[in-house]
Image: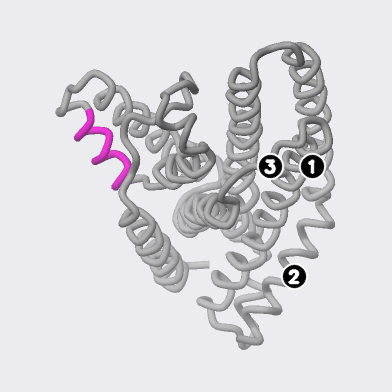
Amino acid sequence: MRNILTIAHLTLHEARRRRIVVAAAICGVAFLAVYATGVSVMAREMDDRPFLVQRVNLVVFSILGMFAVNALVMLFAILLPIDALSGEIDSGVIQTIAAKPIRRADIVLGKWLGHAAIVVSYLLALIGGVLLVLRLITGYTTPNLAIVVPLMSMEAAVLLSVSIAGGTRLSTVTNGVVAVGFYGLAFIGGWMEQIGAFTNVDSVQTLGVAASLVSPSDALWRLALYQLQPAIVRNANALGPFSLASVPSGLMVWWAAGFMALTIAFAVRSFGKRAL
């Protein structure tokens, strides 16, 4: 365990040295500035509207903020560790670490832990920013955060695991293409499931569910999206593209957790057999 924590600490140090955290923070601040402006304008324009209309718009803006946070953090989770292993293998740096009395499994797990700490911290910072903006400008409180935040954190962890696992066998560029494609498969699968449910076309819905099983990240987001919607708005289907005709089963959380564990296990085994 000590070796894993050491590698995680080195991973955090490397992220600071390369100013990855600074770049992500700048992007986050820019997003929150634009979001705060949009919420402020919306609040002024809706001041004379009926209460229910105002409430629906607040829910929409709350979900829109979380949707943007989700997109930013998931891309960050994919790209942050994209060369964590492949880049160091190509440059020969990994030989220095692997030559020491440290198991290769500890290297993989340490890098996963370090990157996961960065990604989850970024997620919490952006969610906190969105909540603060909504609270200060509109007084709105987003519901079910105790469920939403862990679901989004797990979604990021799944994509992070895929990116690290790919780095044990693929070049940096190829790994990036595969990891982004994996995220895209989940996104398309989720929309297919929703379209199939809205149109009552079972075959399309089944295909979407199958895609979600292969790539479960978007299913976790849709579970979080369901929890972000107050019951009165959820039942009215008044949220346009954020309305859900099909909500993933809670069993998808267990499937995603198992998928992530298998992906990490594959990364450890693959890196252990990799010629450095």
- Judging by the rendered image, the residue that carries numbered circle 3 is 141
Amino acid at circle 3: Thr
Amino acid at circle 1: Leu
The foreground one among 261 and 51 is: 51
Are the residues at dot 3 and dot 1 in contact (C-beta closer than 8 Å)? no
Are the residues at dot 1 and dot 2 in contact (C-beta closer than 8 Å)? no
Quadrant containing the N terminus in the rendered view:
bottom right
Residue ID at (28%, 22%): 198
Residue ID at (15%, 28%): 203
| First to last magenta residue range | 205-214
**Secondary structure beneath label 2:** helix
* Magenta stretch encompasses residue 209: yes
Q: Reply above or below: 55 against 264.
A: above
Amino acid at circle 2: Leu
- Judging by the rendered image, the residue that carries numbered circle 2 is 10
Residue ID at (34%, 54%): 250
**Secondary structure beneath label 1:** helix
Q: Earlier in the sequence, mark 2 or mark 3?
A: 2
Residue ID at (31%, 57%): 251
